[in-house]
Amino acid sequence: MNPNTMYITTVVLTYWFVSISMVYLNKILMSNEGLSIPAPLFVTWFQCVVTVVICWFAGMLGDMSRKKLPQYSALPTDLEASKSPAPISKPSFFSQFPRAHYTFTTGCKVFPLSIIFVGMITFNNVCLKLVEVSFYNVARSLTIVFNVFFTWAILGMTSSCKTIMCLLIVIMGFVMGSWGELNFSLWGTLAGVMSSLFVSLNSIFTKKVLPVVDDNHWTLTFYNNCNACVLFIPIVLYFESEVIMDGLERQLKTTEFWIAMTVAGFFGFSIGIVTVLQIKATSPLSHNISGTAKAAVQSMLAFYLWKNDATLLGVLGIFTVLGGSLLYTFVKMSENRHIAQATPPPQELTKPLVAEGTPVAQSNQRGGSD
């Protein structure tokens, strides 16, 4: 393997390891009464606290790294490089993280998104607690369906027949997987559907709120989790105070419990980093393909590790959902490419199309080839 291929392989494998480990570790924390407590809201709150601490620490290191940037000299020319073979210092990995500083004004502007964020991670973890790991991807498979619905309801944008067909395949896989699941949980499945709904809303509201934090994803992560830490406190106290008090005499006194909680919080933060790395190392399409393949491996591995009962209809439902999601990705990428090809670049719009005897069709073709 050449270095580039080696790097891409390492990034993809890291994404798979972090993502699958995060799901499996959260499943243990949500449902293993010997190690943890049956309090998904408390577990989720603690993971938000861990994320805030990591964001603050990474921002501190990033601030230190950026202060050193003026000391780096500009990139030398080839002649200068030949005279000075010493390697040029580069900014550290942490330079991408902004300083974690909370302001009440910005926090209030992010607050509506934080409510959706809390709903998303709450229903996600409740779903993971109640359903089998092998069925988890099926229970949360309706995200793209809600994406298309909200795009039509909020933005007024219609979808093509190919897109609708992909959604029907996903819905059919959801029904097949639910019907074929032996240990079916109605409440767990409903939590998965609600999680999909909030994931879709989260993506829409994120685009609106990002300008508030200067389009910085890590700053938004910090504010979202800070707000979530506050929002979760009354919810946890109302629904899980008795469970937590019972756990104080057993699991909450063990070192294993807090190590598992901290590691799960670290993985929850790391998934954002490895996702960005995979998209940069490959492409958005390759990232979606990798995510679909990872979900298939995650579900199949669950049958072996968690001893989940498998049925033919349940397995067909899993692969139908993943196949429909993958097909949807290809359709959307193809449609976006056609739109880009049909739209001339801005610089050509300012030029007379007949100034050099160039037909409109040829002008559009040149724009598409770029």
Image (cartoon, grey):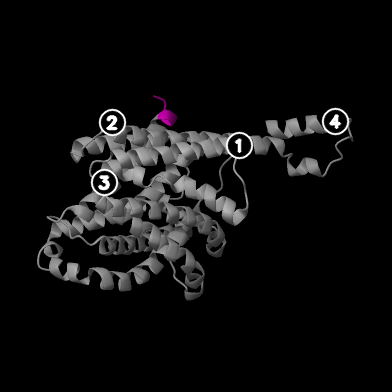
Front: mark 4 or 1 = 1
Q: Quadrant of residue 275?
A: top left
Please report contact status of discs 3 and 4: CB closer than 8 Å, yes or no. Answer: no
Residue for badge 2: 312
Q: Earlier in the sequence, mark 3 or mark 2?
A: 3
Magenta-tinted stretch: 1-5
Residue, disc 3: 184
- Residue sitting at x 36%, y 57%: 121
Looking at the image, which is closer to me, 143 or 17?
143
x%, y% of residue 349? 80, 43
| Residue 355 % position (x, y) | 89, 35
Q: Earlier in the sequence, mark 3 or mark 4?
A: 3
Residue under numbered circle 1: 335
Instruction: Give the quadrant of residue 174.
Output: top left
- Crowd around label 1: few <14 · some 14–19 · many ≥20 (10 Å): some
Q: Earlier in the sequence, mark 2 or mark 1?
A: 2
Q: Is residue 211 above or below residue 301?
A: below
Q: Secondary structure at mark 4?
A: loop
Answer few, some or many: residues within 10 Å of disc 4's Cα (few below 14, many 20 plus, some between 14 and 19): few
Mark 3 and mark 1 lie on one chain; the one further toward the N terminus is 3
Quadrant of the image containing the C terminus: top right
Q: Which mark is residue 358?
A: 4
Give the mark, 2 or 4, whose residue is nearer the N terminus: 2
Q: Is residue 59 left or right of residue 250?
A: right
| Circle 3 or circle 4, nearest the eye | 3
How many marks the image carries: the answer is: 4
Disc 2 and disc 4: Cα gap in Å?
Answer: 60 Å
